[in-house]
Amino acid sequence: VESVIVAIDGPSGTGKSSTSKAVAAALGLSYLDTGAQYRAITWWMISNGVDTQDAAAIATAAGKPVIVSGTDPAEPTITVDGEDTSAAIRTQAVTSKVSAVSAVPEVRALITELQRSIAAAAEKGIVVEGRDIGTTVLPDADLKIFLTASPEARAARRSGEIKGADVAATREALIKRDAADSSRKTSPLAKADDAVEVDTTALTLQQVIECVVSLVEEKR
Ligand code: C5P
């Protein structure tokens, strides 16, 4: 395969972003963080006073923001209407509202279309990370990976990324977000039937990267 498409899905704190960026960089592929796109649209809703509990209001506004994703794994920026929101989308305010916004079907339809066009434009191939990439966005991906880890490991990793974070509170918030993402009607977080499941609980990041790189190389 000249151009390879890799889908990496799984819940939060499994190392999806770190793994996906490193694999893309190692193999010279583009990279797309689809969670950042849902965060960006959520950031826009909050910034523009749209009630994130009001699905009809979100559906109406969904097409307004122009979201542009950088696909360089070394510097995956994201802009909304030309404004760099790479840092703003990582705040607690956005994290706590993103599941509600991303559950709205009109939001998913627009973002899914955007994701497919970005993947189609990546000449050398792309690593796309998210929740529904293998099941819905790119069902014909050359390789599908589903990363998992114990809730304890995931909470510990996420807490390590946030200064002064409380591990127990982080664990509760993660479990709540995964439950919301897994139970929504439109393209929930799920493992595709043909995905390779990698349990990262007892693995170092380097081991996970090596594992995925060798799986991609088998496909090329
Ligand atoms: O990966 P990250 O934690 O940044 O994703 C933020 C949120 O975006 C997820 O909790 C989920 O609600 C949503 N998301 C999604 N589908 C994707 C990627 C992310 O619904 N493909």
Image (cartoon, rainbow, N blue to C red):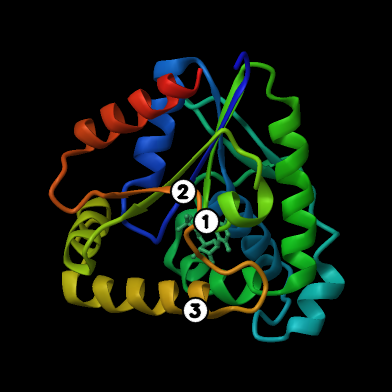
Mark found first going from the N terminus, 3 or 1: 3
Q: Quadrant of residue 27?
A: top left
Mark found first going from the N terminus, 3 or 2: 3
Category of crowding for the residue at label 3, using alpha-carbon neighbours closer than 10 angstroms: few (below 14), some (14–19), many (at least 20): some
Which label was assigned to residue 195?
A: 2
Q: Nearest the camera: 176 or 141?
A: 141
Does residue 150 appear in this view? yes
Residue at mark 1:
192
Q: In front of the other: label 3 or label 1?
A: 1
Residue depicted at x 62% and y 32%: 70
The location of residue 50, given as percent across then percent down, is 73, 77
Answer left or right for 93 relative to 161.
right
Q: Amino acid at mark 1?
A: Ala
Instruction: State yes or no: Cβ of the residue under disc 3 lies below 8 Å from any atom of ligand 1.
Output: yes
The location of residue 61, given as percent across then percent down, is 83, 69
Does residue 67 appear in this view? no
Q: Nearest the camera: 1 or 23?
A: 1
Which label was assigned to residue 173?
A: none
